[in-house]
Image: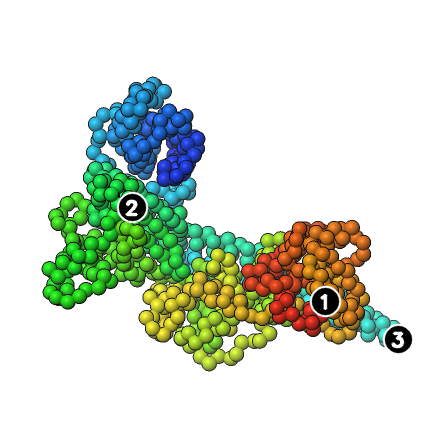
Amino acid sequence: MAADIRQLLLAAFEVEHHEHIAAIRGALGSATPDWNDVFRRAHSLKGAARAVDLPAVEAVAHRLETLFERVRNGASALDRDGANAVHLALDRIESYVAGLKDGAGPDMPGDALAALGRYLGLHGLAPEASAPPAASRAPVAAPVAAAPAPKAPPEPAESGAAILRVPGEAVEALARASHDLASTLAAQAPAAEGLARLARLARDLRAGAEVLAAGAETERPELRAFAARLGSFAREAAELSRRQGAATSAIEAAAVRVHAGAERLALVPAETVLGPLARSIRETAREQGREVDLDLQGLDLPVERGTLQALKDPLLHALRNALSHGWQQPELRRAAGKPEALGLGLEVAVRGSRLQVTVSDDGPGPDLTRIEAAARARGLLAPEGPADSETLLRLVFEPGFSTAEAVDTLSGRGYGLSVAADAARQLLGSVRLEPREPAGTALVFSLPLSAARRSLLLVEAGGRTYALPGGVVERLLRLERAGLPLAMGRTILRHGAGDAATSHPVTDLAEILGPVSAAPDPGNPGGAPPDPGILTAVLLRAGGGRLALAVDRLHDVRSLLVLPAPSFGSDPGLVAGTAVLPGDVPVLVLDPEGLAARAAVTSAVVSAGTMAQAPRSTTASRATARATILVVDDSITTRTLEKGILEAAGYRVVVCVDGQDALDRLRAEIEPVDLVLADVEMPRLDGFGLLKALRADGRFARLPTILMTSRGDAEDVARGLDLGADAYLTKQKFDQRQLLDTIGQLL
């Protein structure tokens, strides 16, 4: 039992020590470190190490704590030597913890304690004064001469639950199952709609039977009994429909959670695999007697583990190459206005539908003259004739190509960049070498996010089949168009419930794609046209939000190999790759980010519209003509115009000069108000603020509210609808009939 408890404590310590070390490293790279927080981190690290009985870590953490206390109190400043000693100590702690097996680890090298001890001694504190206070604890490595550098440590555990190893095949199977579940739920939508229609039909039949029974000249017991049975049937159908709706909503929510869980299992933070590279390159720099400042960015980005593993060795080669070719003597760097330490960078980022990994340095940059000379010597270029920089920078990826004068432990054999190019090709990507501004070199890997078999949702639009990455699909929908609202001329989907609900304009996928080529639908060649009364849509996570796409049909979810996009005949902004269906039928894999960007452009040019249900009859409009409308606008001209139009249509009109004035009047309950027509840009309280206040007040939560403004951007429209506006009109496209029709539909 004690062993089990210690294993749990060690698992927690793995997570905690990573957090403290990352925070300390971040502070060292900051222009204004919070030394109080740094000191607290070292103190917490020491206490955590003591709690899990790791005296070697505790000793180093204690000496770090002593150092940071002096810096925090202003007794000394942390210079370059001190920062190097701290980085060495942090690397040693990480290596030691990563090598733990069954609670025991390798010997902690003494160089970290020695380096910290020397630094403290030079700054007025004897190393002995910083020894750990617990004399009875197990002995630790003494601060003697530096021990040999440890070999590259094992990969660190991934965040707290890393004790469980899950096969990749199991993760893929779970992802496919989650998509199958989503497809099955989408197929159930017509059944739920049919059940609701059945309940309405039974209610209508019951009402008709009761009318017949009441109008019969003689007593008709059988009619009354029939009406009673229809009543029971109607109640049963209504209750069944209600339960079906509640169960479907619960299952959909569970399916979303399963999908998110499967996605998290397939992806790991880049730090998980690439984190050890930082320790390795710092160790190499120490061996070479070179000072480096290592800048790591984007390592918290979730990436598929297989991609990271394939990149690990090439990136280590690239970092070593940067350390070799980017290195300059300190006096040369000072003369160029650079810090003495070589700046190395490793950045992981997502650009559109591609993963971009960059290794950079701030050294002298590519030496095109030496590259050209080496290329001509190897016969890669003609002995004479010009060579442009782009051609020269491609040649460095040739196997065996090197500009180094001699072979050493860092470079000279000419295979580092060749390894990088091979890895990029295997991942169906590319790599390029380019100069940086104002100085330095960057090696940039550009890889498809899906360079392997991927779960793809197949959809049909415009009579052609396309694939969408399954990882971004949030919901599949089939809804009756008649019951959906409109805004800015587009159908609106509401996602979520209550205050958390958001509104998303629906964009037709065929409209975005235009003439983009794709394969005809293999399962339905020349199939029947889709039902115009039913909206079939896919809700995607894209562009930092959600995108609702209308499609003709939803097909199945398949795990397919994603290949690079065709080099011609397709829009690179919309197409992320190609997949091949059985029978050698190609389909284009669409880029969700590109679709979101194109949909935003499409929405921006759509004329202003209203949000409304099905049109109401003229009689119904007249019935509401004496309703009271509150007009809220800070422009006297606009208020007067709107008041005149509404009063001419038979409405009673009350005006207010801004949102706060309107809110005060409504709360005072001076008169009953049936609808609010408000501007957005107003002093004191704007239209968005007024709408938010109304929806938060139980008395006005359902009060119909129309926003009418000159702000017609898609973002403003979405914000207004998300806050609960019933309609959004723009003044640039003002149409008196449109305004009156919208009001008539809402009252």
Could you say whether the residue bearing mark 3 is in a helix, strand or loop?
loop
Q: Which mark's residue is nearer the viewer, 1 or 2?
A: 1
User: What residue sits 78% from the left and 50% below the top?
Assistant: 668
What residue type is disc 1 on? Answer: Leu
Nearest the eye: 672 or 582: 672
Give whichever of 398, 344 is nearer the camera. Answer: 344
- Residue carrying label 1: 641
Q: Which residue lies under the disc numbered 3?
A: 218
Residue shown at 50%/65% (left/top)? 600
Q: Which mark is residue 344?
A: 2
Kindly indicate whether the residue at mark 3 contacts the one at mark 2 (C-beta within 8 angstroms): no
Q: Is residue 81 left or right of residue 193?
A: left
Q: Nearer the N terminus, badge 2 or badge 3? A: 3
Considering the image in quadrants, where does the C terminus appear?
bottom right
Q: CA distance from mark 2 to mark 3?
A: 98 Å
Q: In the image, 712: left or right of 102?
A: right
Whole-percent x and y of residue 225?
Answer: 80, 68
- Residue at the image position 53 percent from the left and 76 percent from the top: 530
Q: CA distance from mark 1 to mark 2?
A: 64 Å
Residue 211 at least partly seen: yes
- Residue 485 visible in the displayed image: no
Question: For mark 1, does the 10 Å Cα neighbourhood hold few (<14), some (14 to 19), or many (20 or more) residues?
Answer: few
Q: How is the image coloured?
A: rainbow
The residue type indicated by label 2 comes to: Leu
Disc nearer the start of the sequence (1/2): 2
Above or below, 419 against 134 in this view is below
Q: Is residue 668 left or right of residue 573?
A: right
Q: Residue at x 23, y 25 (%)?
A: 144
Gap between marks 3 and 1 measured at Cα: 62 Å
Question: Which quadrant of the structure image shows residue 243?
Answer: bottom right
Q: Quadrant of the N terminus?
A: top left
